[in-house]
Each structure stands twice: as C-alpha cells, then as structure tokens.
C-alpha cells in the first residue's frame, strides 16, 4: 500500500514494535508524569475501537536519526505493547528521508500540539521550538528583543497573556528537571520562573540535586532564599543581562554590516540606554573587583600576622 505526501512517497509497512525507537527529543518536549495513564487509556480505546491512526516512523535518513525512529505515535506503540501486540502496520515517512534535521524536528513536534493530555508548559515548549525552527535558530538562541513575537506565538497556542505567560517562558529557560518538577506541581510557577534568573552553574546544581531525588521545592528555596530575596534577585538580573549580551555579541559581532532593516520605534534609544548601562556596569563591577581584592589582601595580611 502506498500513499503520497507533499515531498514524496509515504508507504505503509509492518514493523516489530521493539524495533521502533524513541525520537531523541521525546523526553525533552513531553514529560513522563502522565505517560502511564495515557497509555492505559489509549490501550482501552484501541481494544474497543481498534487503532485509529498508524504510528509514523522515518526510514534511513539525512537528518541523522536512527532508522525506525518514531515521528508520531510513542504512546500508540506503548499501548499496543501493553495489549500484548508485537507487530504493527506503520506509516514509513520516505518523504522525510532527505529532509534536514530542522524539518524532521518540526514534523515530530507539530502533531503533538493536538495531544489531549498536553500541559500548558508542554504546549508552550513545542510552540516556542517551532518558532525557533522557523527563524532558523538553535534552541534557546533567541535574543531578548526578539521575544515579543515568540511570546505572542506561544500565547496564542496556550491561550495565555500577561505576566503568567512571561513566567512560562522563563520556566522554559530552566533545565528540563526544573520544568518537569513544575509540571508535576512540585514547584509553583513563580518559583520555577525565578530559577531562570540564577547563574547557569546554580541552575545546573539545582537540576543535579533534583535528578538525585532531592525535594525540588526544598532545593529551590535554598537557592532562592527566604526573606532576603532582593540582593539575590539583583545579582541574578545582572547575570541574566550579561548572558543576553553575550548571545547578542556572538550573533552580531561579525554581521553588523549585513543589517539593513529599519529600526523599530524606540530601538535606537534602547541601544543608547544599553550603552550607558554597560559603561556603568563595567565601572561598578570593576570597583567591586577592586574591593574584593583589597579585602582578600587584608585577610591574608591578618593571617600572616
């Protein structure tokens, strides 16, 4: 049996369920908190009505994925295995065999926007990544001033706006362990979003402790602090600003002369303010560094004496 899609042939063939491989991004975009329940529900539905939609896989390909990687249907495979099946007819996406990695990733993500059990954070995660793919960006590569359009795109998908939407976007900047802890309701939205403002090494330490089984809430409260949040938040804001500036330098440093679009209203003034802020920050951080050196010299002098 053969059917046609826009870029080439799509065939239906039989495969052993054990030979079907998870897409490498499956665990990054779709949490496991309700996976077992979803599989059981789907298995019951298949028992009553049969499999309504075939699993889709990719054959040998140019995107670098293993042959028989699932593009759509991870839960369907697991539900069939739960029912004792060992084989199934699958749709083989030969139309993706020569597609690049970004195109294949988009095909993997798009069907999952319609999943019934998708959390708002998962929907936001998929919508943001699809926007990044459209803009030919790597995950997390969008610069701060490009977030408005991304925010609007995500807001349309999840039906959200305002402060909570911004917090959701901040949560997506944190390690996946933090995101899954939020989806499991181990962290509040406010707590999870504030982690994005911590330095990268602190975020990784939090993720590592959660991986080891520590209480996500206890770990995060330790790093965010209680009753003295202002200094930590201020330090985090500086760290976040520096990271955003580093991304901008990496993208624009050698490409300034290629920019030909007209600036948006207020952009020039914003750049002027940023330039002034950079100079003030540089002066303040240099002063802090000098103070730290002097304090260390006094401490060493005291120890020597």
Image: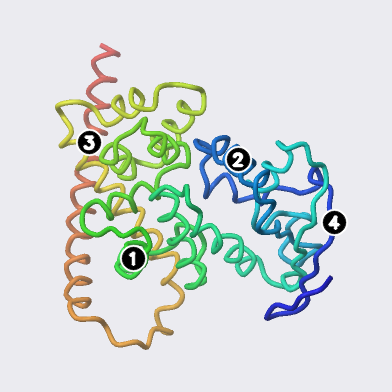
Element class at badge 2: helix
Task: Report the residue marked by disc 1.
Answer: 156
Task: Kindly check if marks 2 and 3 are in contact, taking CB atoms under 8 A apart as contact.
Answer: no
* Disc nearer the start of the sequence (4/2): 4
Q: Is residue 139 above or below residue 190?
A: below
Q: Residues within 10 Å of mark 2 (few under 14, many from 20)?
A: many
Task: Report the residue marked by disc 4.
Answer: 14
Task: Please report the residue visible at 33 percent of the width from the left and 70 percent of the height from the top.
Answer: 149
Q: Residues within 10 Å of mark 4 (few under 14, many from 20)?
A: few
Q: CA distance from mark 1 to mark 2?
A: 28 Å
Element class at badge 4: strand
Q: Is residue 90 above or below residue 41?
A: below
Task: Report the residue marked by disc 3.
Answer: 232
* Disc nearer the start of the sequence (1/2): 2
Q: CA distance from mark 4 to mark 3?
A: 57 Å
* Disc nearer the start of the sequence (2/3): 2
Q: Residues within 10 Å of mark 3 (few under 14, many from 20)?
A: some
Q: CA distance from mark 2 to mark 3?
A: 43 Å
- Kindly report which numbered mark, 4 or 3, lies closer to the viewer in this rendering: 4
* Disc nearer the start of the sequence (4/3): 4
Task: Report the residue marked by disc 2.
Answer: 39
* Disc nearer the start of the sequence (3/1): 1
Task: Please report the residue visible at 56 percent of the width from the left and 39 percent of the height from the top.
Answer: 35
Query: Which quarter of the picture shows residue 1?
Result: bottom right
Element class at badge 1: helix
């Amino acid at each position: 049996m053969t059917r046609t899609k826009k870029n080439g042939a799509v065939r239906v063939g039989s495969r052993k369920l054990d030979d079907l491989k998870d897409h490498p991004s499956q665990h990054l975009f779709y949490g496991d908190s309700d996976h077992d329940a979803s599989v059981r529900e789907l298995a019951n539905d298949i028992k009553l009505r049969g499999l309504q939609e075939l699993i889709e896989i990719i054959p040998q390909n140019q995107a670098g994925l293993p042959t028989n990687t699932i593009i759509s249907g991870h839960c369907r495979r697991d539900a069939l295995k739960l029912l004792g099946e060992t084989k199934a007819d699958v749709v083989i996406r030969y139309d993706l065999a020569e597609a690049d990695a970004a195109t294949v990733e988009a095909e993997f993500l798009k069907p999952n926007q319609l999943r019934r059990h998708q959390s708002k954070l998962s929907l936001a995660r998929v919508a943001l990544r699809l926007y990044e793919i459209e803009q030919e960006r790597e995950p997390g590569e969008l610069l701060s001033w490009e977030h408005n359009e991304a925010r609007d795109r995500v807001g349309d998908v999840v039906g959200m706006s305002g402060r909570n939407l911004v917090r959701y976007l901040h949560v997506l900047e944190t390690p996946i362990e933090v995101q899954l802890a939020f989806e499991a309701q181990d962290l509040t939205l406010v707590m999870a979003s504030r982690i994005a403002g911590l330095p990268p090494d602190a975020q990784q330490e939090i993720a590592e402790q959660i991986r080891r089984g520590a209480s996500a809430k206890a770990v995060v409260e330790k790093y965010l602090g209680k009753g003295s949040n202002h200094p930590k938040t201020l330090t985090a804001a500086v760290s976040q600003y520096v990271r955003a500036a580093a991304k901008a330098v990496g993208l624009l440093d050698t490409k300034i002369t290629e920019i030909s679009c007209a600036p948006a209203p207020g952009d020039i003034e914003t750049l002027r303010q940023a330039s002034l802020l950079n100079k003030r920050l540089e002066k303040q951080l240099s002063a802090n560094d000098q103070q730290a050196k002097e304090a260390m010299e006094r401490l060493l002098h005291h120890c020597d004496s």
